[in-house]
Image: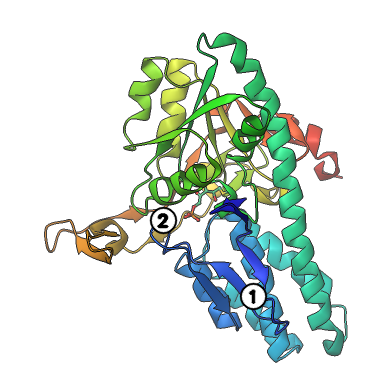
């Protein structure tokens, strides 16, 4: 997608042929567009854990390149094992991380060490390209849902609420939840997006609003508690969010607060849809509330907030009483019964085992 009118991805091989990898540093957005170079496994692991990259598909893509950087140094079995372990420990909830690491392991382990680095680079590049294509298809399938809403709006403007950032910054390009919005924009449909601020890290205000603005999509940032009121007043036609892990039965882990939006949508008869690539489905899990590991992050992410001063400098300030403890749970699980449908690269389905298996029949138990 575009930054200042220039097509950009979130991760790419450095142009100097060194084998290093470059990323957009998302901790600097929206105040600065900064590129960071990843030159080692440690750089890649840090980029994921401090959230220079974030969003389920991008975490997977970065982990894939992290394996490449490790193998560039030492392509032995022992170093491969250690790299996979290090990367897997960076963040627990988004299953794309484990998925991408398994893909990399499968691609390189059978090979002689001398051949592993080249094969790893090739597979990491494919993982990125496959993600772009999956997101593009999610956009097309989601567009069909949006088209159906247009005739119901007297003013022709379709109003969509989203939570967190599941746009192109969370993937390699296009995004998941925002891909249908970009497809609708390209199809000439008038869209307005309600952007949940998404405390504590403000991925909505800092990232979703940034990318919608860069793409010229009409939007407004709202405080996280506003969505229910807007739904009661028929100001929301559709809620679309992404997912960090979706179980076999259609339960969806996503950024903390997603569940409350689903409850409000259910109470108001607003469709609540989740957009995700197949790499986000955890076929081994059924009950998301019980079984999906939920990340708990540092309380300091709640207790401080960063912003730009009048002189342009970016500062971080304390907002809580000194000494008050805080609890920072990063994700919650929305049960399948509250999800109207899932949009995947293979089409739209019910949030249920039968729905998912209709799109992924190869996942039927033997
Ligand atoms: O903590 P983050 O910023 O990595 O959380 C991201 C989200 O919750 C996204 O909504 C989710 O990964 C879907 S991304 C396409």
* Residue depicted at x 72% and y 60%: 128
The outermost residue toward the front is 5
Query: Marks 2 and 1: in contact by CB < 8 Å?
Result: no
Residue 296 falls in image quadrant = bottom left
Q: Is residue 279 above or below residue 115?
A: above
Going from N to C along the chain, the mark reached first, 1 or 2, is: 1
| Residue 170 at x, y percent in the picture | 56, 53
| Residue 182 at x, y percent in the picture | 62, 37
Residue closer to the observer: 288 or 266:
266
* Residue depicted at x 46% and y 51%: 207
Secondary element at image label 2: loop
**Direction from residue 36 to residue 50 in the image, left or right:** left
Q: Residues within 10 Å of mark 2 (few under 14, many from 20)?
A: some
| Residue 13 at x, y percent in the picture | 69, 73
The answer to whether any part of residue 124 appears in the image is yes
Tell me how the rendering is colored: rainbow
**Direction from residue 339 to residue 79 in the image, left or right:** right
Residue closer to the observer: 268 or 122:
122
Q: How many numbered circles are shown?
A: 2
Residue 234 falls in image quadrant = top left
* Residue of label 1: 21
* Residue depicted at x 43% and y 18%: 267
CB of residue at label 2: within 8 Å of ligand 1?
no
* Residue of label 2: 30
Discs 1/2, front: 2
Distance in Å between CA atoms under marks 1 and 2: 22 Å
Secondary element at image label 1: strand
Q: Residues within 10 Å of mark 1 (few under 14, many from 20)?
A: many
The label number, if any, that marks residue 53 in the structure image:
none
| Residue 290 at x, y percent in the picture | 51, 45
* Residue depicted at x 51% and y 55%: 293
Q: Is residue 292 above or below residue 10?
A: above
């Amino acid at each position: 997608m575009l930054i200042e009118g220039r097509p950009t991805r979130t991760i790419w091989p450095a142009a100097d042929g060194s084998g290093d990898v470059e990323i957009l540093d998302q901790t600097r957005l929206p105040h600065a567009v900064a590129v960071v170079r990843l030159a080692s496994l440690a750089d890649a692991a840090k980029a994921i854990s401090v959230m220079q990259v974030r969003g389920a598909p991008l975490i997977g893509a970065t982990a894939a390149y992290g394996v490449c950087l490790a193998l560039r140094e030492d392509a032995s079995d022992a170093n491969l094992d250690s790299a996979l372990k290090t990367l897997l420990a960076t963040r627990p909830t988004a299953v794309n991380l484990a998925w991408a690491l398994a893909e990399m392991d499968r691609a390189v382990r059978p090979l002689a060490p001398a051949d592993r680095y080249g094969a790893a680079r090739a597979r990491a590049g494919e993982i990125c390209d496959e993600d772009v294509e999956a997101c593009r298809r999610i956009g097309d399938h989601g567009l069909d849902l949006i088209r159906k809403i247009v005739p119901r709006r007297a003013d022709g403007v379709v109003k969509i609420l989203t939570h967190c950032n599941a746009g192109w910054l969370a993937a390699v390009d296009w995004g998941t939840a925002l891909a249908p919005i970009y497809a609708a924009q390209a199809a000439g449909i008038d869209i307005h997006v309600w952007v949940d601020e998404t405390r504590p890290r403000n991925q909505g205000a800092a990232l979703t609003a940034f990318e919608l603005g860069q793409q010229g999509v009409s939007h407004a940032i709202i405080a996280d508690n506003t969505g229910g009121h807007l739904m009661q007043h028929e100001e929301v036609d559709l809620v679309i969010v992404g997912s960090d892990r979706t179980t076999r039965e259609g339960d969806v882990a996503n950024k903390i607060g997603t569940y409350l939006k689903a409850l409000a949508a259910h109470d108001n008869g607003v469709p609540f849809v989740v957009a995700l690539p197949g790499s986000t489905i955890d076929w081994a899990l059924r009950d998301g509330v019980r079984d999906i590991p939920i990340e708990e992050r540092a309380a300091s992410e709640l207790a401080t907030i960063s912003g730009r001063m009048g002189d342009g400098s970016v500062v971080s300030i304390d907002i809580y009483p000194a000494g008050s403890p805080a609890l920072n749970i990063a994700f919650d699980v929305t049960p399948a019964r509250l999800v109207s449908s899932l949009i995947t690269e293979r089409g739209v389905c019910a949030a249920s085992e039968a729905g998912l298996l209709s799109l992924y029949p190869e996942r039927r138990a033997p």
